[in-house]
Structure formats: C-alpha cells, structure tokens
Image (cartoon, rainbow, N blue to C red):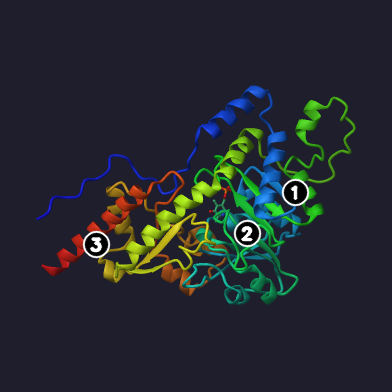
C-alpha cells in the first residue's frame, strides 16, 4: 500500500482575492486625504469601468444586489409584475424583484452552458412578464443579441454580470456593452474585489442619472460636492423615495488598482481552468465541465464540474466533504432557488435540467491569488479520492 497523500496545512478557499501593495497604498492615501465617502475616486473608477466594459455610463452602488434592484426600478418594474430569472443563481438575482413587490418566475438552464436560453425563458413568459434578469453563470457570456431577437420587445433584459467582469459575448465585445442595464459585483470573492460593491453599466443617460440619484436618498447633488463647495446649498429638494446605496472612495481606490490588474488575474485564472479541464477529461466520473470554461471569452469566475453520482460511488455532498477534509475549498453554486422553502412558496416550478444539475455540480477553487501548484494539489487529491473509491469497489 502506498502511504497516504500529505494534506496541505492551510485551507484552499474557493475564491481568494489578490491584494498587493498598490491597493494597500491607495487605501492609505485615501484615508489620509480626509474624505473617504463617495467622491473623486468613485468618479474616476466609474469612468475607468465604463471604458473597460464598453458602456458610456457606469454608476457604482454599494452591492450588486442594489445594482439589480435599481436597474429594475429604472426599467419600471413594479408590484404585481413578473420577472423571469434562472433558479440556478445566487438569491440576490431573485430578491431584487421581491423587494419591489414583483414576482420572480424561475426558468431552466441549458445542460451544456448552465445558463438560461431563449427557449427556457419563452416557456415562462406571460402577459405580466415585465423583465428578465439573466445570469452569465460562472462567467459564460450569454448571447444577448439572440435573446433580444427572441423575446417580445416589451420584456426588458437586465444582465446579472456578477460573475462576468471581463467576459465577452459571442461577437467578442465585452459584457456590459450590450445596451442592456448590466450589473456587476465587487464582493469579496469576485473577479474584481473591493470587499463590497456593485455597478450598473448602461447606455441611457436619463436612467444613469436616475440610478445615480436614487442611490443617495434621491438627492441630486453628490455628497462630496456639498462637502467641498460651500456654495452648492440651493438644491432642488427630494422628488421621490430614494435609498442609501452609494459606493465610497475607500472602496473605489481599491477597485481602480484591481481593475488595472485584471489582465494579470485573467492569465492565472486561465491557467488554473485549463489544468482542471485537462485533468477532468481523464476522469470518467466527471459527467461534464461547463461548456466554454476554457474559452478566452469566459471570465472563469467559477470553475464548475458536474459529477455522475453513480460513477462517483457517493453523493456529491459526501465527495465535497472528503475534499474539504483534504483542505480543498470546493463548493456548490448553487442550491437552486426553486427548491428552497421560501422561493418554492413563491414559484413551485418544475425545472428538469436545473434539478438534474442540482445534486451533481461542484465548484473547484479558482482565484487570482491561487497558483498553478494549488490547482495541481486539487487535481492530485481529486485523483486520489476517486482511486480510493475504485479500490473499494474491486474488493
Ligand atoms: C455575488 C452575486 C450577486 C450579488 O452580489 P453582491 O455584490 O454580493 O450584492 C448577484 N448575483 C450573482 C449571480 C452573484 O454571484
């Protein structure tokens, strides 16, 4: 018998961000400046983001959840409307509609891309459908041109691009440049991380101004202008209910450095994804890897594999726990919403592909701070755990 494989002493978290002295120095500079709220750093970050995603306007907000919520408001979604979303997503995608009194309606995904399709959405459209919030799952960019052509013109498309900063559509243009309101997340483990944060990229100047106003209690002038210019006291006054959903310079200064480092991060993510894909191609227990996972257009926010539980010889959950026992931070994205008690009561949908994938999918660790040696560690332990199972079957 060969000796057991050594286990690394530290836990390999599934999406560890990478912060360098550049980010740390930027924070120190903003702290010393005396203004850490929303101000000139935020404005500069918004302009740099707009350039990066190919949209004329970017409005930052406190979270991607708020970005989706304010996008729905800007698109006129209100109480009683239906908003179609995948079930295979983070709860925020659906919650944003519920906050407005609208009803999330869950649709299925494609078995290869794990993303919604024109057909899966069409099956759930009714007279009350006001919008769809699509998710570029794991970083796979949905063909939004084909989707726009397939949907009735009255149905607004909002893109949840929380996984897709840096992804490109089929025609090579960046996610964010489609003309749809496109929402990004700068949450702790996202590709561009500032701890918390979000943004809406869009082409409509009026909607951009409305979102920019709504994010700061519907006050038209920026707080920093009121802070720095003693003269701007003659404000027009609040015209509608606003929210406190603004971003801050303390975060924006981190975001600007993270944005500049995206090419460096992309190279690392790509190398890790390619290693995983190559190894999994030789594992018959792997039913499939998400389509496009090694494609240059994919931001590789998540690396998702679906296991065959029969060939695996145990449940995905048990396999996940075995991996975690080896300090591999594998995870699941996601437990489908329509199978959770709260959302099942709202829309008890029957979604064949999503329910097939639910007990099979696993996210392997991938992140800007991960090395190729870390990826090799994951592969070695996947192989070892699968071999142990095969041996157990032989006796
Ligand atoms: C992370 C995430 C969100 C929410 O982002 P926050 O910035 O944490 O609000 C929304 N949708 C998806 C698919 C996500 O992964």
Residue underneath mark 2? 175
Q: Earlier in the sequence, mark 1 or mark 3?
A: 1
Residue underneath mark 3? 386
Instruction: Find the distance from the CA under tag 1 to the CA under tag 3.
Output: 50 Å
Q: Nearer the viewer, mark 2 or mark 1?
A: 2
Q: Residue at x 63, y 22 (%)?
A: 32
- The reply to whether residue 181 is in sight is yes
Instruction: Find the distance from the CA under tag 2 to the CA under tag 1.
Output: 20 Å
Tell me where residue 253 appears, x and y as whole percent: 62, 35
Element at label 1: helix
Where, by quadrant of the figure, is residue 179 drawn?
bottom right
Disc 3 crowd, CA 10 A, few/some/many (<14, 14-19, 20+): some
Disc 1 crowd, CA 10 A, few/some/many (<14, 14-19, 20+): many
Q: Are marks 3 and 2 in contact (CB under 8 Å)?
A: no
- Image quarter where the N terminus lies is bottom left
Tell me where residue 329 appears, x and y as whole percent: 36, 49
Tell me where residue 386 appears, x and y as whole percent: 24, 62
In this rendered view, identify the residue nearer to me: 287 or 244.
287
In this rendered view, identify the residue nearer to me: 341 or 329.
329
Q: Nearer the viewer, mark 1 or mark 3?
A: 3
Residue underneath mark 1? 211
């Amino acid at each position: 018998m060969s000796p057991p494989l050594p286990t690394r002493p530290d836990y390999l978290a599934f999406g560890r961000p990478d912060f360098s002295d550049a980010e740390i120095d930027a924070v120190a500079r903003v702290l010393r400046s005396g203004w850490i709220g929303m101000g000139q750093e935020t404005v500069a970050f918004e302009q740099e983001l707009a350039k990066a995603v190919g949209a004329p306007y970017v409005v930052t907000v406190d979270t991607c959840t708020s970005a989706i919520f304010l996008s729905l408001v800007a698109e006129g979604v209100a109480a009683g409307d239906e908003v179609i979303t995948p079930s295979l997503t983070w709860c925020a995608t659906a919650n944003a509609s519920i906050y407005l009194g609208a009803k999330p309606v869950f649709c299925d995904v494609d078995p290869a891309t794990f993303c919604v399709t024109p057909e899966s959405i069409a099956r759930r459209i009714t007279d009350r459908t006001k919008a769809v919030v699509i998710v570029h799952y794991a970083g796979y960019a949905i063909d939004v041109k084909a989707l726009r052509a397939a949907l009735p013109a009255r149905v607004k498309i909002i893109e949840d691009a929380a996984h897709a900063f840096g992804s490109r559509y089929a025609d090579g243009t960046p996610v964010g440049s489609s003309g749809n309101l496109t929402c990004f997340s700068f949450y702790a483990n996202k590709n561009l991380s500032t701890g918390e944060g979000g943004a809406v990229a869009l082409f409509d100047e009026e909607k951009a101004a409305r979102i920019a106003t709504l994010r700061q209690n519907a006050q038209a002038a920026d707080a920093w202008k009121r802070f720095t210019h003693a003269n701007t006291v003659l404000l027009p006054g609040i015209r509608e209910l606003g929210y406190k959903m603004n971003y801050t310079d303390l975060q924006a200064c981190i975001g600007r450095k993270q944005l500049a480092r995206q090419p460096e991060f992309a190279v690392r993510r790509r190398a890790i994804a390619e290693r995983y894909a190559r190894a999994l191609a030789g594992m018959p227990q792997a039913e499939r890897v998400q389509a496009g996972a090694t494609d240059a257009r994919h931001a590789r926010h998540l690396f998702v594999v679906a296991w065959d539980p029969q060939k695996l010889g145990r449940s995905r959950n048990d396999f996940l726990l075995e991996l975690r026992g080896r300090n591999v931070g594998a995870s699941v994205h996601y437990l489908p919403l329509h199978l959770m008690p709260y959302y099942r009561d709202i829309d008890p949908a029957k979604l064949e592909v999503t329910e097939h994938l639910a007990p099979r999918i696993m996210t392997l660790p991938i992140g800007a701070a991960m090395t190729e040696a870390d990826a090799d560690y994951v592969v070695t332990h996947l192989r070892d755990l699968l071999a142990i199972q095969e041996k157990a079957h032989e006796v």
